[in-house]
Image (cartoon, rainbow, N blue to C red):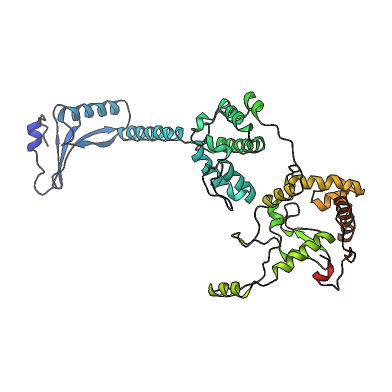
Amino acid sequence: MAKQNFTAARIDGLQCESGKQQTIYWDAKTPGFGLRVTAAGSRAYIFESRLFGKTIRVTIGDARAWDLGRARTEASRLKTLIDDGKDPREVRVDMQVAHEARRAEARRQDVTFGDAWDEYVLVRQPFWSERHYRDHIQHANLGGMPRKRAKGLTQPGPLAVLRPLRLSELTGARIAEWLTSQATDRPTMSALSFRLLRSFIRWAADTPAYSGMIPADAYKSRDVKDATPRVRAKDGDSLQREELAALRWDDVDFRWRSLVLDDKVEGSGGRTIPLTPYLASLFSNLKRISETPPNMRQISRIAAQGEQWSPSPWVFASKTAADGKIAEPRIAHNQALAAGGLPHLTLHGLRRSFGTLSEWCEVPVGVVAQIQGHKPSAIAEKHYRRRPLDLLRMWHDRIEVWMLSQAGIELASDQSTEPASDRLPSDNVAI
């Protein structure tokens, strides 16, 4: 088809030839510049040329959106790319990729610590224990969630104030400032928060989506080290309160006086320790209370709800707890301290007290460690010491008798210190 000089009026008069799907008209002024008109009535400026022996056709744009002069300029630009040996289509793709990369980087730079932290917790949860997972939720909690068994709002976790910050703002100076402000009121908790934050920063550095966003020395700077709370190390394999709270009657053997604790030292199989006489008497009383049916009115109310009363399987049962057992023992612990006029003592402090006071009874260190659930620390303990339950029971009973004597508590005269396979639990101990 013969070329013609494009003008705005001439462009408007060009039509698709009869019987064809499309017709292309070429401009005589600008090489490779044309107008494509389809039978459906669409009109678009195009550019066509040859590169390395192959024909390349590029659509410039709709003729209704592009004026003629601007379309000619674009055609000239495309001709320059062809003359330089560049495929305009590839250049366009490269430009689009670079544009998307810039947008992605801009979005990446706007990611906050809170958003990245939530993703971190979600991704790593399968590799954590339940307790470790709860620590991450608690320490970054914004607060405001209702407490169980208490009115009011929860206190925000130490990491909550960092949630709005962009990752690039987690500098060493900012972390040191955060540690200083938190350590005054909550040194132990803020120290744990820092350890959790440090692990998060390492994860972010190894995750492509966040790599390089947090300064490399964010937790290694001298300011951060100076601001990190100094907390005295505690025994690593302690008996957690959840483990004893989850004690079932199936774990208590009154006949042979033993308890099975599902702690993290021995794994899922649990750890068996002796049940001392005085503790057995307390448990026996709890069991009697647990097995005592409620009055007829309560039984009727339970039946009306389509349920049937049965004794609680939990040693430390609770009628108000959602799962039927006590979840927080510190309330009763603090009440006992107040009633006895004793100074503040943590639950873990009771554990350390047991190990310390046992020395007054001249109990072998290995026996105390085994009862407490410590892992063997010496070759002889690991490979050559196999203490049966009877031996542990003998020493455990001696410790309890000494502690009760110091407290001025007398055991019942008929309270046996030997396991009795012929006795029922109620006969085995005296209340």
In this figure, what is the number of numbered marks? 0
Q: Is residue 243 left or right of residue 376?
A: left
Rendering quarter of residue 394 = bottom right
Q: Residue furthest top?
A: 222
Residue 425 picture location, percent across and down:
80, 69
Residue 421 picture location, percent across and down:
86, 71
Q: Residue at x 48, y 32 (%)?
A: 166
Rendering quarter of residue 180 = top right
Vertical side of 271 occupied by 348: above or below: above
Q: Is residue 6 left or right of residue 350?
A: left
Q: Is residue 236 left or right of residue 371?
A: left
Using the image as rendered, state which of residue 401 and residue 124 is in the foreground. 401
Vertical side of 291 occupied by 28: above or below: above
Q: Residue furthest right?
A: 362
Rendering quarter of residue 219 = top right
**Quadrant containing the C terminus in the rendered view:** bottom right
Using the image as rendered, state which of residue 117 and residue 356 is in the foreground. 356
Residue 261 picture location, percent across and down:
75, 57
Residue 200 picture location, percent across and down:
58, 38
**Quadrant containing the N terminus in the rendered view:** top left
Q: Is residue 422 left or right of residue 110?
A: right
